[in-house]
Image (cartoon, grey):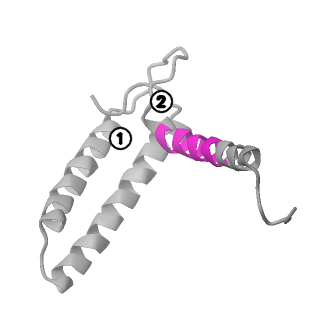
Amino acid sequence: MNPNVKTIEQYYSIREQQLAEYRAEQEQLASPFRVDKAPITIVPVTVQLATIKKLLNDCSAINVPLMLGSNGNAAATISSELDYKLNQLYQAIKEVREVKKFSGKLIS
């Protein structure tokens, strides 16, 4: 039997491993947006939450014209601005979750 030919069981095994890796990656990406079931302590994060909401609105305001299309130069400028805002949003969420240990809803 050719060693390069895989059986159906081997394909299923490989596919299950790929799905497990994909699900783990998706879980990691989605975890900052989930509400933990742990007890919630009151943490003064009002300013950070307001910043997150503002950044989300800014990203939407930048992304809508980008999706509607424009000439190449404007699209490159908008993309870099969107990238900058998304990076700020990521840092704000990371600070609230990891530094402030906030486990409530980020966005209502």
Q: Which residue is mark 2?
A: 102
Residue 33 lies in what quarter of the image? top left
Callout 1 amino acid = Gln
Q: Is residue 14 above or below residue 43?
A: below
Determine the residue positioned at 61% across, 41% down.
24
Determine the residue positioned at 47% across, 39% down.
30
Secondary element at tag 1: helix
Callout 2 amino acid = Phe
Q: Which residue is mark 1?
A: 48
- Image marks 2 and 1: residues in contact by CB distance under 8 Å: yes
Image coordinates of residue 101 in percent, x first then y, are: 53, 32
Image coordinates of residue 57 in percent, x first then y, are: 20, 49
Binning the other alpha carbons within 10 Å of mark 1 as few (below 14), some (14 to 19) or many (20 upward) gives some
Magenta: main secondary structure: helix
Q: Is residue 84 above or below residue 73?
A: above
Determine the residue positioned at 52% across, 17% down.
37
Left or right of 78 on screen, residue 69: left
Front residue of this view, candidates 103 and 19: 19
Q: Is residue 25 magenta?
A: yes
First to last magenta residue range:
18-30
Front residue of this view, candidates 53 and 60: 60
Image coordinates of residue 67 in percent, x first then y, are: 18, 63
Image coordinates of residue 104 in percent, x first then y, are: 42, 25
Left or right of 91 on screen, residue 64: left
Q: Is residue 34 above or below residue 94?
A: above
